[in-house]
Amino acid sequence: MAAGESSGSVVRRILLGSQLRRLRDSRGITREAAGYSIRASESKISRMELGRVSFKARDVEDLLTLYGVTDEAERDSLLGLAREANVAGWWHSYGDVLPGWFQTYIGLEGAASDIRIYEVQFVHGLLQTEDYAHAVVSRGMRGAPAAEIDRRVALRLERQKALVSERAPSFHAVLDEAALRRPYGGREVMRTQLRHLIEMSERPNITLQVMPFSFGGHAGESGSFTMLRFPESDLSDIVYLEQLTSALYLDKAEEVAQYEKAMVRLHDESPGPEESRDLLRGLLQLS
């Protein structure tokens, strides 16, 4: 199965969950009552409506009946969505090294049509060379077996294939100069990484900007974040915030709007793509 198709299963889970929530709300049924109808808890309904669990066909059928959905075409459409939502993504084969909270992100990243990021600590994972990625993972997981580090790097490289695929998303990255000056893996690894950034920045679907130290304080003061947009019109934009042992997925309009403003300001305040390439070339000469 193609990576795009399996990534879409995460989006379908979210879409189906939102449809079920809409139907439940329209009938004035509580989560507790919905959970009782499928022999489950209120929290299980909440997780289903957020698209964070897989769906059993029987549960979906029972919920549709409870919500008064009798039209066969509508039922078949939603049950079909449930079947598609349960397709395992390619990343499940990396389950031995992949935290559960990050699996959702990989699915969303692979299904997005537009990805915008601000990164301050290191070069974003989708733009890392293999040696740089190995250095980043090794430093972050001191003492981990070499085989585990290799698996994590392989997963990162697999994610990168989406950027050069036929259905590649639009990718707009703002890298803080700090991410480019912090050494990982030694001089030659950093030089190769800088050359890779220059090369990737010239791809038609990729826009790369560097926020220089010389600008001073800027709109990225709260730290790194990612914004994802999807081709499905009924799926809202999502802001992804990664933490040490978990992640936040923000989709409330007012919260997303705040990050949208910060992202637009970062785009406006950072040097443009050509100037940013010049900054990268300058760093390359200094390294």
Image (cartoon, rainbow, N blue to C red):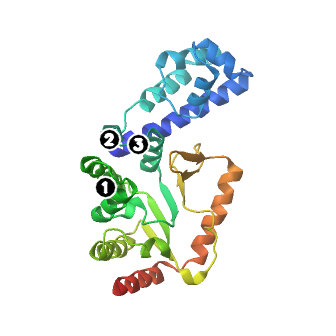
Looking at the image, tell me whether mark 2 or mark 1 is earlier in sequence order. Answer: 2
- Image position of 75 with respect to 92: above or below: above
* Outermost residue, front side: 143
User: Label 1 amino acid?
Assistant: Leu
Image x and y of residue 100, in percent: 45, 38
Q: Which image quadrant is residue 130 in?
A: bottom left
Closer to the camera, 217 or 276?
A: 217
Crowd tier of the residue under label 3, counting other residues whose Cα lies within 10 Å: few below 14, some 14–19, many 20 or above? many
Q: Quadrant of residue 27?
A: top right
- Residues under labels 3 and 1: Cα distance? 16 Å
Mark closest to the chain's N terminus, 3 or 2: 3
Mark 3 against mark 2, which lies toward the viewer? 2
Q: Which mark is residue 7?
A: 3
Q: Amino acid at mark 3?
A: Ser
Where is residue 257? Give x, y as percent: 68, 57
Say whether marks 3 and 2 touch (CB < 8 Å).
no
Q: What amino acid is at disc 2?
A: Tyr
Q: Look at discs 3 and 1 and give the one toward the viewer.
A: 1
Question: From what the image shows, is residue 221 above or below residue 72?
Answer: below
CA separation, marks 3 and 2? 14 Å
Q: Secondary structure at mark 3?
A: helix
Crowd around label 2: few <14 · some 14–19 · many ≥20 (10 Å): some
Q: Which residue is mark 2?
A: 94
